[in-house]
Amino acid sequence: MTKDNKSFYVILAVVSLEPMSGYDIKKYIEGSVSNFWNISYGQIYPTLNRLVEIGYVTYDVEKNGNRPERKVYCITENGISTLKEWLVAPVEEGNPYGSELLLKLFFGSNISIEDNINHVIRFRNQQSVYLENLNSIRDRLEAYKEKDRNMEYQIITVRQGQIHAQSKIEWCEETINRLTEIKKYKGVEK
Amino acid sequence: MTKDNKSFYVILAVVSLEPMSGYDIKKYIEGSVSNFWNISYGQIYPTLNRLVEIGYVTYDVEKNGNRPERKVYCITENGISTLKEWLVAPVEEGNPYGSELLLKLFFGSNISIEDNINHVIRFRNQQSVYLENLNSIRDRLEAYKEKDRNMEYQIITVRQGQIHAQSKIEWCEETINRLTEIKKYKGVEK
DNA sequence: TACTACATGTAAACGGTTACATGATTGC
DNA sequence: GCAATCATGTAACCGTTTACATGTAGTA
């Protein structure tokens, strides 16, 4: 509930795709965003109850003869607007791995392409600053290397950060291009 | 205590560098591994107490006149051997970000270069399998793209995974070279 | 026969952060 | 005078995982 509980919004976003049970939500997440996000039943079921309480989702009980009952959850208007609010809200800084950005992009078709592009631009800028920081750290370590051989182990981890940040920036550029392409296409379509 | 509590081992590893207080440990972590690992006092102080109980560290109270007292912790023989055991133990799979590997490498000078190289080789192999998996997922999505335009958002997140995995593999290659270089140098030295 | 898939849920434990309490010293 | 640094610690809370409980249906 605490404003930046990602699992809360992920569940809401998955249910928004189509009415689903808790079991289905787990399956869906495993087959889509599990690359950068995961969830357990211990989170799903209590969260669904909370979502019902707040009025972001409703549910119908589906009785399938002698097979177990399913509670099929469906997002409400209220739920949709809350989801969109979260999707457009800027990604909190200091999320190095960027999983929040990826989650928002995965469900990006719910908001405008511009909003998605802005997320990526912001992230790229953060990464640039971060990379420059690592560059200077590396230079410093490299200078000390002659005095202390064990510095190599430190350099290894800093190099990981550099390569990592560089690859993220590359991905950002590609993604921005990809999204602006869609924007052009959508423009022609209408 | 639960065998794979990383913070527990990080604190132990930092204290192994030189006798330090809880406050120093925090400072040290902020200035070194904070790139991929962080910690709060709420973890440090209780963990230090536990480390004393188990006998992995001891401490002396340092009185500096009217400045606050410092508890300076020092690793024991028992602590050192436990730390080394952790450092050589293979990194648990399914750690996508690889922070455990980075931690072990950062403190890699405590164990043999071969052990460090093996960690990296194992990680690289895991990443290769993972990358091939993502490649086939992407091919599948790309095929569906013509039918469903929103597939682009899914492709974006998969692309991130691909680029990410590729960069990790590159870093692994570089790191393996770096470490084998040190190995050669050490060989000549002796 | 045994395992997997379907299906919902809870309780305990764990790892971690945040906020609080306390108080001296140093530098702007 | 105020903020930052030094220094230790606790309690509450949060998000998450794991283990458990319960039971049916289909498949190897």
Image: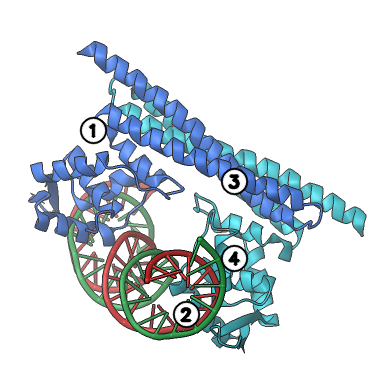
Chain colours: A blue, B cyan, C green, D red
- Say above or below: C14 vs B147: below
Q: Nearer the viewer, residue A44 or B143?
A: A44
Query: On the same chain: label 2 and label 1?
Result: no
Confirm or deny contact between disc 2 and disc 1 (CB under 8 A). no
Q: Amino acid at mark 3?
A: Leu
Q: Is residue A113 left or right of residue B123?
A: left
Quickly name the residue at label 4. Answer: B28
First of labels 3, 1 by sequence position: 1
Residue B150 visible to the viewer = yes
Give the crowd class for mark 2: few <14, some 14-19, many >=20 residues within 10 Å. few
Q: Residue at x 62, y 76 (%)?
A: B20
Q: Residues within 10 Å of mark 3 (few under 14, many from 20)?
A: some
Residue A151 image point, x, y percent = 73, 55
| Alpha-carbon span between mark 2 and mark 1 | 45 Å
Of the image marks 4 and 2, the number of the one nearer the N terminus: 4
What chain letter is assigned to the residue under label 2? B
Q: Chain of mark 1?
A: A
Q: Amino acid at mark 1?
A: Ile
CA separation in Å, label 4 and label 2? 18 Å
Identify the residue under disc 3: A134
